[in-house]
Image (tube, helix red, strand yellow):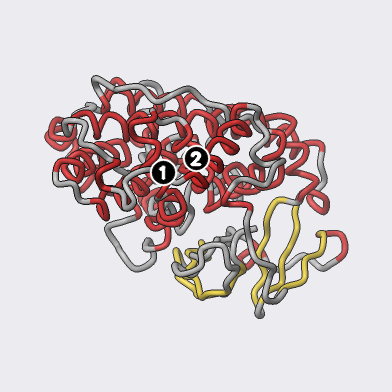
């Protein structure tokens, strides 16, 4: 893996993972929707009845990150902090044992996503026991989010955005730009949900698989960088007096040819883990009758027909082409507030202003598909250390 060795103090400055979230809103919503299709019939009617709300709430953990200082560590785990050679042999899977070895503060600093997933799964089990439909939906959506995070390789490393290897923006490229640009080429027909005898071990297995993809994630980008000039590699966006840099569509196209199979593989696998954890929580709660929690208690004829259409499309791998993904259903943009040019068509902005990675704002909770323009807090790395600035940005495309 391509890395730079930094002094301990400098490394500590970049551990907060900024405002980046795995998969972007687009990917998290796809994972949640597809997970519903992988459920058994005894659960599927209830989850399908609530699918729109599940999909909407699946981005809530990212939406509250700027306001909740305890939220950010729940989305990642920097395994290479503990060891670059054998991190999974050094970090205990059980939280209490990991605390004894490293302290709770250390775990929070370097991320807790596997333990958060288990905690939310246990809370979901209790919600099933209590027949608490509101919390069943809320916790199912949030469980989907954290599981999705664990499937992204860049959520397992200190170098989460390529910022240590002069590849800043790699996070957004991998988990947002590629899926949004190439979703029609990806396969979403995953496996049916299965009961997990040891949920924590299953989650750790996925974290380890994500970590195993890191080398290719960085190295394949480096190979393209060596043959693609900077003025083609990057695009600069001027927005409300601010300038940000991101990888160009030309670079995204080249990177997709190199790593697209990996992105597709992780995007396809995440819903199966999500639906399996939903199933496990439900079975651990004694398999309560979910139909009895619905009003009306049986699926309507229209719901059955709609679900059958979507299941058929999912099995044929044509959900995106058939425009059946809720993440695709967006209203037209209210305004276009920025101008985007290639690097060769404009003067290169100062290094400090171009290093800020593009961030996606939270959509209006009342209308998740409606593009909005919100103020965002963005962490940038300047000469005087880490600084927080505010900027405006468009909703994710």
Q: Residue at x 31, y 49 (%)?
A: 294
Can residue 221 be seen?
A: yes
Please tell me how many numbered marks the rendered image carries. 2
Q: Residue at x 72, y 68 (%)?
A: 349
Side (left or right) of 313 relative to 116? right
* Percent x, y of residue 281: 24, 34
Mark 1 vs 2: CB contact within 8 A: yes
SS category of the residue bearing label 2: helix
Which of marks 2 and 1 precedes in the sequence?
Answer: 1
Can residue 160 be seen?
A: no
Q: Residue beneath label 1, please?
A: 299
* Percent x, y of residue 365: 44, 67
Side (left or right) of 131 relative to 152? left
| Quarter of the rendering occupied by the N terminus | top right
Side (left or right) of 138 relative to 180? left
Q: Examine the rendered structure and indicate whether residue 395 appears above or below residue 112.
A: below
* Percent x, y of residue 397: 65, 58
Q: Residue beneath label 2, please?
A: 304
């Amino acid at each position: 893996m391509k890395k730079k060795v930094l002094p301990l103090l400098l490394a500590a400055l970049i551990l907060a993972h900024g405002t980046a979230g795995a998969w972007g809103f687009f990917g998290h919503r796809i994972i949640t929707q597809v997970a519903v299709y992988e459920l058994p019939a005894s659960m599927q009617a209830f989850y399908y009845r609530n699918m729109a709300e599940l999909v909407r709430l699946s981005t809530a953990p990212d939406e509250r990150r700027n306001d909740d200082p305890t939220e950010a560590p729940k989305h990642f785990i920097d395994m290479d902090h503990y060891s670059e050679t054998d991190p999974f042999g050094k970090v205990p899977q059980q939280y209490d044992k990991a605390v004894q070895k490293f302290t709770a503060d250390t775990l929070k600093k370097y991320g807790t996503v596997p333990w958060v997933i288990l905690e939310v799964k246990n809370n979901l089990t209790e919600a099933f026991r209590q027949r608490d439909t509101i919390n069943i939906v809320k916790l199912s959506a949030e469980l989907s989010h954290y599981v999705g995070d664990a499937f992204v390789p860049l959520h397992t490393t200190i170098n989460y955005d390529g910022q240590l290897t002069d590849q800043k923006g790699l996070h957004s490229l991998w988990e947002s730009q590629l899926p949004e640009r190439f979703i029609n080429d990806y396969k979403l027909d995953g496996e049916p949900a299965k009961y997990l005898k040891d949920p924590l071990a299953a989650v750790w297995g996925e974290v380890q698989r994500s970590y195993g993809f890191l080398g290719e994630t960085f190295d394949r980008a480096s190979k393209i960088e060596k043959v693609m000039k900077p003025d083609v590699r990057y695009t600069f966006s001027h927005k409300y007096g601010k300038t940000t840099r991101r990888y160009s569509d030309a670079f995204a196209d080249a990177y997709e040819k190199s790593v697209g199979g990996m992105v597709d593989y992780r995007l396809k696998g995440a819903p199966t883990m999500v639906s399996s954890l939903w199933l496990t929580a439900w079975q651990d709660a004694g398999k309560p009758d979910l139909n009895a929690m619905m009003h009306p208690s049986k699926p309507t004829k229209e719901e059955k027909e709609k679900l059958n259409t979507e299941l058929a499309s999912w099995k044929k791998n044509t959900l995106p082409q058939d425009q059946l993904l809720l993440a695709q259903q967006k209203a037209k943009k209210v305004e276009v507030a920025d101008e985007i040019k290639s690097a060769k068509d404009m003067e290169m902005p100062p290094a400090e202003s171009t290093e800020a990675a593009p961030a996606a704002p939270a959509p209006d909770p009342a209308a998740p598909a409606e593009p909005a323009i919100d103020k965002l807090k963005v962490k940038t790395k300047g000469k005087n250390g880490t600084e927080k600035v505010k900027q405006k940005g468009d909703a994710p495309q």
